[in-house]
Image (cartoon, rainbow, N blue to C red):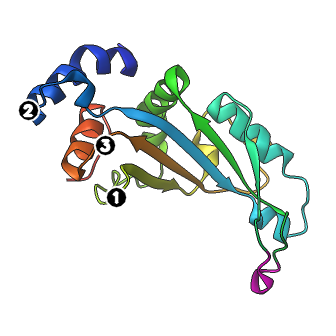
Amino acid sequence: MSLKEKYAKEILPALQKELGLTNVMEVPKIEKVVINIGIWTYIKSGNKDFSSLKEHLKLISGQEPTVRYARKAISNFKLRAGMPVGLAVTLRGDSMYAFLEKLIHIVLPRVRDFRWVNKNSFDTAGNYNFGLKEHSIFLEVPQDDVIANSGMQITIKTTAKSKEQWVELLKMAWFPFSK
């Protein structure tokens, strides 16, 4: 059973009952997943070609990443306005559920010395943020093409209104939280 089917059939009624919500539309759900990879280390080292990293993110997410540019110059970092600093992908719908399922069942168990993810990484807007040190742990990335491992930040946006709702939603969705 996929994560999307599990949410509709099992998680939604269980969350509604556990949180004591009367309306089905009040039940928290996952809105989107945003994946970010910083390319500043590529640019700073003199390597202007980050197309391999862009291709890796495309293979990981299943859609074309957008290049993010610096909005203003910061002289201490030798950063100029308009320089590329990152790649980002926003996943919604079926691709979001497929990515989360792959992340939970395949990728996170491959992380070296995996100690589960922290429950305290929620912000006040209902986002859950965590990072991975290597993008090469995804099976889609060809290991021969990896020039240098880049870290990635993954943000899961939910419609939950409190930390208890956030934790319960992601826990029921098989998310591996630490005790």
Q: Is residue 126 left or right of residue 151?
A: left
Which of discs 2 and 3 lies nearer the camera? The answer is 2
Q: Are marks 2 and 3 in contact (CB under 8 Å)?
A: no
Mark 2–mark 1 distance (CA, rounded to whole Å): 22 Å
The answer to whether residue 142 shows anywhere in this view is no
Q: Which residue is mark 1?
A: 124
User: On screen, 147 above or below 59?
Assistant: below
Residue, x 56% and y 57% (percent of image)? 133
Say left or right for 65 vs 162. Answer: right
- The reply, left or right, for residue 155 in relation to residue 166 is right
Provide the secondary structure element on which disc 3 rests: loop
Q: Is residue 124 magenta?
A: no
Horizontal side of 23 relative to 127 (left or right) equals left
The disc, 1 or 3, on the residue closer to the chain's N-terminal end is 1
Disc 2 designates what residue?
20
* C-alpha gap between disc 1 and disc 3: 21 Å
Residue beneath the point at 49% across and 36% down: 32
Amino acid residing under circle 3: Pro
- Label 3: how many residues lie within 10 Å, few (<14), some (14-19) or many (20+)? some
Tell me which segment is drawn in magenta: 73-78
Q: Amino acid at mark 2?
A: Gly
Query: Pointer 2 and pointer 1: residues touching (CB < 8 Å)?
Result: no
Give the residue type that dot 1 points to. Answer: Thr
Q: Residue at x 64, y 45 (%)?
A: 136
Disc assigned to residue 176:
3
Answer with mark 2 or mark 3, whichever residue precedes in sequence: 2
